[in-house]
Image: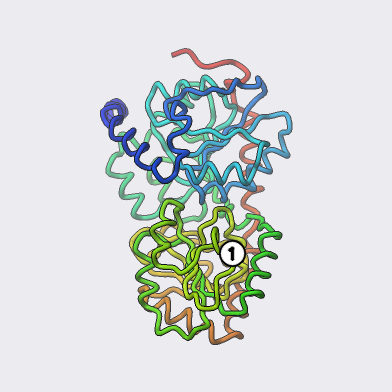
Amino acid sequence: MWRLAYSCLIVAAMPLILARLWWRGRREPFYRRRVGERFGYYRDTPSGRPLIWLHAVSVGEARACAELVRALGMAHPGFDLLLTCMTAAGRETLRALHGESVQVAWLPYDYPGAVRRFLEHFRPCLAVLVETEIWPNLVAACGERGVPVLLANARMSGESSLSYQRWPGLTQPAIAALAIVCAQSNEDAARLRALGARRIEVTGNVKFDSTPDETKRAAGRAWRERLGRPVLLLASTREGEEKLLLDALPAWDEKLLVLVVPRHPRRFDDVSALSQSRRSLNPLPAANHRVHLGDTMGEMDFYYAAADVAVIGGSFAPLGGQNLIEACAAGVPVVLGPSMFNFAEATRLALEAGAAIQVGDAAGAIREALRLLSNEGERERIGSAGRKLSDANRGATQKHLLLCEELLRTATTGAATGPAPD
């Protein structure tokens, strides 16, 4: 009954969903391409080989699961790999990371007919959903067709747990239907178990296994050398944060360069109004430029390598923060705002290791960042702690791979038997 009501609701919302899709396509044209895939209609003809499907909703998840995708490809060279996403930036990231070695498509909206067509078209042997992408109709359809679903790198904040508890008739069956949940931490595992998960393995965070692009790192260091100025990176900022942080800066000393990299590419043009130059047009800012906009995709390794200190965005409004692990792995001192609930375990580990500093507001973040810029010894100490933290927490990808292997061995797959009867 709950799922029927949910399905009726999203069918009724279809005009609004399509309008929003078209609206977002003004700035990111790919949203207006292959719209049929959003409803389960795909052009490409399947190869007939067995297929593993992995869903990463957007950029963060796409980057997080990159090593798992590569590991699955190496372990199963006779399988096709299908990667799905929901955002234009996520799709671009998946293609940039994996090229033509994988298939990339939109995941359909969670309409019963759309998810049924999706599964009948691709007939996956295994479904891997990254982090908290639990769609009731999709998970139910996988169960009907004997497709085991693994929830990878799963996290569940206290806030998200309360949201799931409000709709137990809808969320509990979906979570209970997951074959295996790979939780990032014991706290995530406890919350997911309370919500109905049956089998949970605490595997750690696969983001610690991300392999940096050494070419981009070298380019970032060379850029910083050419610049010859201290660089403060405002990384993965969200709406309104750039102005908060920039307004907290003291009078310019004519040396510091503030490098701003917004989380979402659709905001690049808006944030450009706060900067004097942008990377896509001015690869090296002029000496009299105080704020430089990082408006290129897939270059976080470059930006972290170019920075002396990084302030992590998404943490100065109640948004839960953005990924701090990349900065720690790069050996960059990290300053966090108060809201990091989406990365609670990584934040706890970083603070305990001395790899990050957390403050209460934007003004405090700027004060700490400027203090670190004036103290090379402390920067080196914090950066070294970040690298050690990243090295110590590797290994989650291999644990995920072993659990995927277990499900592949025991599953009754659509590839072998065809779809289950309706």
Quadrant where the C terminus lies?
top left
The picture places residue 109, in percent across and down from the top left corner, at 40, 31
Asked if residue 312 shows in the view, the reply is yes
Asked if residue 351 shows in the view, the reply is no
Q: Residue at x 46, y 69 (%)?
A: 276
- Left/right placement of residue 79 relative to residue 266 reads right
Q: How many marks?
A: 1
Task: Tell me which corner region of the image, top left, top right, bottom left or bottom right, holds residue 82.
Answer: top right
- Left/right placement of residue 140 relative to residue 211 reads left
- 398 up-or-down from 241: above or below: above
Q: Amino acid at mark 1?
A: Pro
Of residue 153 and residue 311, the one placed in the foreground of this image is 311
Q: Residue at x 60, y 70 (%)?
A: 306
Q: Residue at x 31, y 45 (%)?
A: 165
Quadrant where the N terminus lies?
top left
Task: Tell me which corner region of the image, top left, top right, bottom left or bottom right, holds residue 48.
Answer: top right
* Secondary structure under the numbered disc 1 in the rendered image: loop
The picture places residue 209, in percent across and down from the top left corner, at 63, 55
Sort mark 1 into few (<14), some (14-19) or many (20+) by Cα contacts within 10 Å. few
The picture places residue 5, in percent across and down from the top left corner, at 26, 28
Q: Which residue is mark 1?
A: 283
- 89 up-or-down from 135: above or below: below
- Left/right placement of residue 75 relative to residue 1 reads right
Of residue 106 and residue 222, the one placed in the foreground of this image is 222
